[in-house]
Image (cartoon, rainbow, N blue to C red):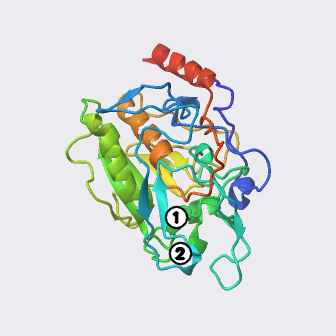
Amino acid sequence: MYLPLISQPRRSLRQRAEGSTGGASSGAKGITGGSGESEGGAGGLSSGHSVGKKLIQWRFSGTSTDGEASKVPLSSSSSMSLGKSSATAYGYGGGDSIVIPDGQPFAGRSAGGGTRGQIFGNRTYGSGYPGITGYGVSGRGFPFWFWPVVWSDTAAESQPYLNGSEYGNASNTSRFGGPLMEATFISNSSSPNTTFHVLSDNSTVTSLIQSIDANCSHYLSSSSSSSPIPFDVSSANAPQPQQAVQYYRASSVVLTLDGYNNSATFSSNANLTDSPLPSNMDMNLSVCLNQTIARAVPLVNGALPSSFVAPPLASVAVLAVVISFLLSSF
């Protein structure tokens, strides 16, 4: 089934390797299933939707959600922070972008300006950049300040667009927010093989563990992470790019699913669509994780005008179509 604004064709390998700096931002929002159909929704649930033990009101007006905004310290040894010492969980983001000055890492590139409503990518490395389509992260700016995740050299050798070596390895302490870390979230339901991982910088993963525990604990096994662990790309159990089910915040956050193998990730077929997600995965947990990350992932806030009204991440109409499809599929 094709859903407008959600299903997307794959691009050529040349476009994957080089990326693209033009066109509209990625349209796929939320975790997508089957043939690109959204399973996690696009971000805007009606007021009073219950996720786990906590009731979250995701308003379509005003400047906040019912999640508690809180400062998140940015652990980094990089001078690229340029005075940014914290981000905000459940914050809006925004503000003016800057050009990184000479003498700083990635001088001449832009940084900042990304908002909460722009954080969704899809399953493609290089998605989630506002106003940019295409594969890969090479040469790009930092609309949310945070650096993109990096994959192993082996993955990059198989597909050049997966090469993020310009941002250093996973343990690079100069990374905005600190080195790459991961957290594991295991379903407590009878659905087999439903184990998710969140991969991002240390500050982000630490914050998301708290937000996910508050919102999704009803669906989580006690074996889920209570603190982040370093992302070891050489580990046999490490998340892999073909397991990505959703990128966020300019590919600086990724949600992966154990056992999922997206054949489009390494394919030379430009028209190949994403592989369907497992039909027996825990849908409740997948939706809760996706929506919590969307609303709670830390952003560097800019100044908001007093008359600001926060836009929804997606229209209620699109979400209604998605929910209708899901109900008819299970």
Q: Position of residue 323 (x, y in %)?
A: 51, 20
Q: Which residue is mark 2?
A: 168
Name which residue lies at 68% across and 50% down: 130
Q: Check the picture and name the quadrant holding the C terminus.
A: top left
Is residue 108 visible in the rendered image? The answer is yes
Q: Residues within 10 Å of mark 2 (few under 14, many from 20)?
A: some
14 sits to left or right of 293: right
Residue closest to the far front: 306
Above or below, 188 against 70 in this view is: above
Name which residue lies at 53% across and 18% down: 325
Q: Secondary structure at mark 1?
A: loop
Q: Check the picture and name the quadrant holding the N terminus.
A: top right
19 sits to left or right of 304: right
Which is nearer the eye, 146 or 34? Answer: 146
Q: Are marks 2 and 1 in contact (CB under 8 Å)?
A: yes
Above or below, 177 against 284 in this view is: below
Q: How many marks?
A: 2
Which is nearer the eye, 60 or 276? Answer: 60
The amino acid sitting under disc 1 is: Val
Between disc 2 and disc 1, whose residue precedes? 1
Is residue 201 visible in the rendered image? The answer is no
Question: Mark 2 and mark 1: span between their CA atoms?
Answer: 8 Å
Q: Which residue is mark 1?
A: 150
The amino acid sitting under disc 2 is: Gly
Residue closest to the far bottom: 103
Which is nearer the eye, 167 or 295? Answer: 295
Name which residue lies at 63% across and 38% down: 309
Q: In which image quadrant can residue 55 be found?
A: top left
Q: Position of residue 22 (x, y in %)?
A: 80, 52
Residue closest to the far right: 22
Q: Position of residue 253 (x, y in %)?
A: 50, 54
